[in-house]
Structures are given as structure tokens and as C-alpha cells.
Image (tube, grey):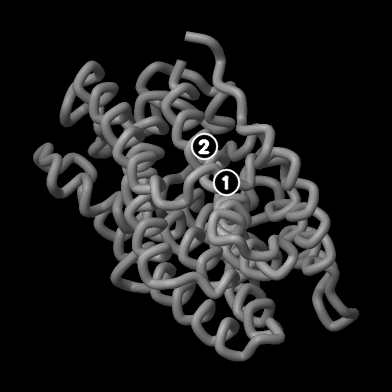
Amino acid sequence: MATALFPPELNSKRQLVDDALSGYCEFDSDCPQRLAEAIRYVVLAPGKRIRPLLVLAATEACSGDVQQAIPAACAVELIHNYSLIHDDLPAMDDDGLRRGRPTCHIQFDEATAILAGDAMIPLAFEILSSIDDVSVAAESCKVLARAAGASRLVGGQVDDLAAEFADRDVGVLEKIHRRKTGALLTASLELGAVSANAGTQQRNRLVEYGQKLGLAFQIADDLLDFRGSQTKMGKRIGKDADRGKMTYPSVLGETESEMRLHQLAEESIAALEIFGDLATPLENLARFVVNRTH
């Protein structure tokens, strides 16, 4: 199978996100220089920007204005990056490489990395609170806070750590990753719908797409780690097996994991039927997730 290409219709919007993030990461003189450098080092590192681009694509699918969705796109990327900093720490996954570069605690130090992550959380909500439409700002804060909280992102991280060297159970595995990986992906789509003032049916379909895509995305990551593709992962491979982590290949096997990946991708695409051609970027992203494992 040919190497996966990131959907060009999404790729073209990446610069909008990067420019906005760069502006949001300019701090006043009261912010210590080392802290500002650490935040910018992580947030402005080269990346696919999948979550913010999902926000923009969902907004377009609901016939909204992409420019109005930029704050929400940047907010979810900040929460994602804070979670990566903390996930890479020695107390958690103990990673030294992220996006092909030293992780934040390696490049700086553990304390600076922790505090850089801490600083990104209030910044994300400050950005959302500045949205002109008060009802959109409030709902966006609610969506992102719920996704990043104890029952979703953080809870999934806790259970992922607790599952190291545990008995292999696909139900437990999916419960972990619906929260650890899927929560922010789904929130990104909800934020796009909120930015576009979308109706309940549109929002529900985007959530369904996001839930399927989130699991597919995790299976793809697990397969890349299992197959040893550090170039595509941008981080150390084989670490999941070393730490006894529960992964899809370790629970289902490689072949069944691949089948499950394709099934979830097709189900995610089916959820977008009501959007017609406006959902093409989202459909292509689901196909990209499948193809990046080869």
C-alpha cells in the first residue's frame, strides 16, 4: 500500500493554526523566559495538528466560518500538548523523544516541563473565554473541560498506567482509549460544531465519527509501535511492550487489529453521510489514519 498522505484540504489550513498558536505563545515580561521557551518548544514543534484541524473541518462540515473556530482549535491543541508533556515524564511513560525531538523534560528539566504543561491549561481556557459570542465561549469551555478531566483524558491516563502488565482484555483497552485518546479527538469535533452553531443532529454525528476515529487512531499508533516505525511515530518505538502496556496487537493480534482498524474507519465515514461533500476532509482523514500504518 502506498505511503499515506495527509489530506491536502486539511494540510492547507495548518499554517492558520501555527500562526495563531505562535501569537498565543507570546508572553509578557512577568513570564519567566525559560518557561516561555519551554512552552514554545513544545507547542510550536512540527506536527500534524490533527486535533485543531478536526475543529476547523467540523466547522466547515456544519457550514461555519473557519476563522471563528481558530480560538477553539488552538485551545484543544494546548490541552493536547500539556498532556503530551506530562505523559512523557519519567513518572508516567518515561519518553525521551517526541515529534522527532527530545521531550520537554529532556530539553529543559522535569520541573520546567511540569510547569510548562501546567501553564498551557489556563491559557487554553483564557483563549476560549475571549470568544466574542458568550454562549459559544461558555459551551466551548464546558466541552473542553469535560474532555480533559478526571473521567476522560486524565482518567484514561490513570487507567493506562494501572493496566501495565495486567491481564489482556479488549473491553478494558477500549475503555482506556475512548478517554485517553478519543476524548480530545471527539471534543475537537464538538468544538467545531459549537463554533458553527450546529444543530443537535450534526453534533451527534460528529461525536459518533470522533468516537470511531479515536479508537482507529489508537489502533494505528499501536500497530506502528508494534511494527517498529520510529520515523512515522516521531518517538521511541517498542516502548509499549517494554513497559508491559496493553495494546491492540498484544490483545487482538496484528491481523485482527488491522481488521478492527479498517472497520472503525469505515464506520466513522458512514457517520458523516448527512454532511455530503462538506465532510470530504473528515472522510479523507479517516482514510489517512488507516493508511499511515503501512
| In this view, the mark in front (2 or 1) | 2
Q: Secondary structure at mark 2?
A: helix
| Residue hosting label 1 | 50
- Residue 106: horizontal and vertical position, in percent? 64, 46
**Can residue 181 be seen from the camera position used here?**
no
Q: Secondary structure at mark 1?
A: helix
Badge 2: how crowded within 10 Å, few (<14), some, or many (20+)?
many
- Residue 169: horizontal and vertical position, in percent? 11, 41
The one nearer the camera, 142 or 47, is 142
| Residue hosting label 2 | 285
Badge 1: how crowded within 10 Å, few (<14), some, or many (20+)?
some
**Is tag 2's residue or tag 1's residue first in the polypeptide sequence?**
1
**Can residue 264 be seen from the camera position used here?**
yes
Q: Is 6 drawn above or below residue 58 in the view shown?
A: above
Residue at 77% across / 57% down in the picture? 40
Tell me the amino acid under the disc marked 2.
Leu
Tell me the amino acid under the disc marked 1.
Ile
The answer to whether marks 2 and 1 mark residues whose Cβ atoms lie closer than 8 Å is: yes
- Residue 134: horizontal and vertical position, in percent? 62, 90
Q: Residue furthest bottom?
A: 134
Q: Would you identify the image quadrant in which residue 240 lies?
A: top left
Q: Is residue 233 rendered to the left or right of residue 160?
A: right
The one nearer the camera, 216 or 57, is 57
Residue at 50% across / 70% down in the picture? 198
Residue at 70% across / 70% down in the picture? 68
Q: Residue furthest top?
A: 1
Q: Would you identify the image quadrant in which residue 219 lies?
A: top left
